[in-house]
Amino acid sequence: NNEVVIGDRLRGNIEPGAMTRMNYFGNHMLTWIASALYGVTTNDLCTGYWAFTKSAIAKLKLNSMRFEIEAEMYASCVKEKIMIKSIPINYRSRIGEAKLGSIVDGWIIFKKLLVRRIFSTPVEVITGKGNLDMD
């Protein structure tokens, strides 16, 4: 039984124009970095398609407010030994403008991966002082 299932865009079918080259490259890099840092393979770190059991949600310790949330969910799942199943999905162009800013958000996601590797629990859970691990 898997407690977490993610929709894997990178192993599925990405409609032309649905993801910029920069986001595609950045997602591959961040996914590789996450797998290397945590020793648990993931295929699409930045997917927005996550499904959780109630018990999995209860185990997660999160403090992210933006796009780094996927990196933190992954890190928390690894720490709590929650199995993540990946299912290839079709990814289509969105209606409207993308909200992700490739380089800035990629840097924030990278920092979250590093911080959660060093401090496996969000900093404010330890200190009681808010989101200290991000700018």
Image (tube, rainbow, N blue to C red):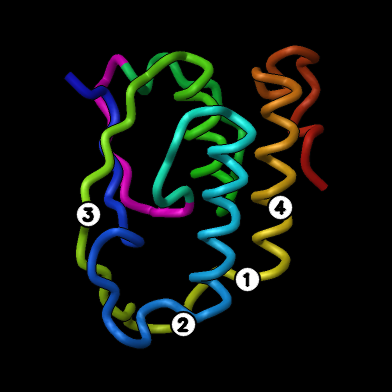
Per the model, the C-alpha gap separating discs 1 and 2 is 13 Å
Q: Residues within 10 Å of mark 3 (few under 14, many from 20)?
A: some
Residue 51 on image: x %, y %: 26, 38
- Label 2 CA crowd tier, 10 Å (few <14, some 14–19, many 20+): few
Q: Disc 1 vs disc 3: which is toward the camera?
A: 3
Q: Residue furthest bottom?
A: 17
Name which residue type carries label 1: Ser
The answer to whether residue 39 is magenta is: no
Q: CA distance from mark 4 to mark 1?
A: 10 Å
Viewer-proximal residue among 73 and 62: 73
The residue that appears at 24% across and 62% down in the rendered structure is 12
Lower position in the chain sequence, tag 4 or tag 1: 1
User: On screen, 48 above or below 90?
Assistant: above
Q: Which residue is mark 1?
A: 102
Label placed on residue 88: 3
* Residue 52 is covered by the magenta coloring: yes
The amino acid marked with disc number 3 is Pro
Indicate the secondary structure of the residue bearing disc 4. Answer: helix
- Image label count: 4
- Residues rendered magenta in the picture: 46-55
Instruction: Give yes or no for contact between labels 1 and 2 (Cβ–Cβ under 8 Å).
Output: no
